[in-house]
Image (tube, grey):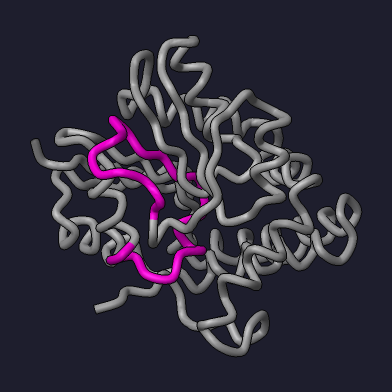
Amino acid sequence: MAIEPHPLLSAYYADRGDRVAFVRALFDRTAGDYDRINNWFSFGSGDAYRRGVLARAGLGPGQRVLDVATGTGLVARAVARLQQGQGWILGLDLSAGMLAVARQRLPLDVVQGRAEALPLPDQSFDALTMGYALRHVADLATTFGEFKRVLVPGGRIVLLEIGRPSGRFAYRVARFYLGAVIPALARLASGRDGAALMRYYWDTIDQCVAPSVILEALHEAGFEDVECRTTMGMFRNYLARRPC
């Protein structure tokens, strides 16, 4: 049974079959300005945070890492710093525009594709990362099945996400900042497309399923050592391991 990360967002696409084309086109149009928008969103702390999460999850030299939904390569760059030149990273993304920017930022091998149908061999990676894009897949069950397929036995996944805060006050602050302030700033950087991207970003956060649903989907896909670590009430890291 399919497990959608959020309901149909009819303000952006009328039918579920239109979602992939909408997301691809939106990220293609905003690829050149994405890093600047992200830096505003994270107050410049995003790179250090990503490296810390990945390091604590055990990523480092000598590993073959698949970075799914690599975008402009923000997570891939953090992995590369931890590898210190010893290892291999493959970036996969739906958007050709994002992949082009990623290769400008980092000498990165890339492939265009979807998380739900990875165009890659079985058991070919030691670790899999994904940064703030789980909300953009069509089906969590299919996606996690693909993640397990391409990992070696004992291979780990690290999914960085952002979720809706549970407290009423924290939610109101997040809704104002992510749903109004950031889109307004993004309009300055990338015009209407940048504003649309960040409004969509917030709506997927606001409508995303609870962490318990994601954890259960990981269990159902056959992963072990499944857990969710939360920072500041809304930054969530989902960790899991393929059984040996």
The residue lying at 31 percent from left, 24 percent from top is: 58
Residue reaching furthest to the left: 244
Residue nearer the viewer, 111 or 6: 111
Residue 211, x across and y down, in percent: 33, 60
Reply yes or no: does residue 134 show up in magenta: yes
Specify whether 29 is left or right of 139.
right
From the viewer's perspective, is 27 left or right of 148?
right
Q: Nearer the viewer, residue 10 or 105?
A: 105
Residue 88 location, quadrant: top left
* Residue 107, percent from left and from top: 62, 23
Q: Total label count?
A: 0
Q: Please indicate whether residue 29 sits to the left or right of residue 222 in the image.
A: right
Q: Which residues are magenta?
A: 118-142
- Residue at screen point 67% across, 59% down: 178
**Is residue 217 located in the magenta-colored stretch of the structure?**
no
Could you tell me residue 218's position as x and y percent?
Answer: 23, 56
The answer to which of 128 and 165 lies nearer the viewer is 128
Residue 160 image position (x, y, % from top left): 44, 44
Residue shown at the point (30%, 55%) measured from the top left = 146
Q: Is residue 30 above or below residue 58?
A: below
Please tell me whether residue 207 is drawn above or below residue 222 in the rendered image: below
Image quarter in which the C terminus is found: top left
Left or right: residue 62 versus residue 163 is left
The quadrant where residue 159 appears = top left
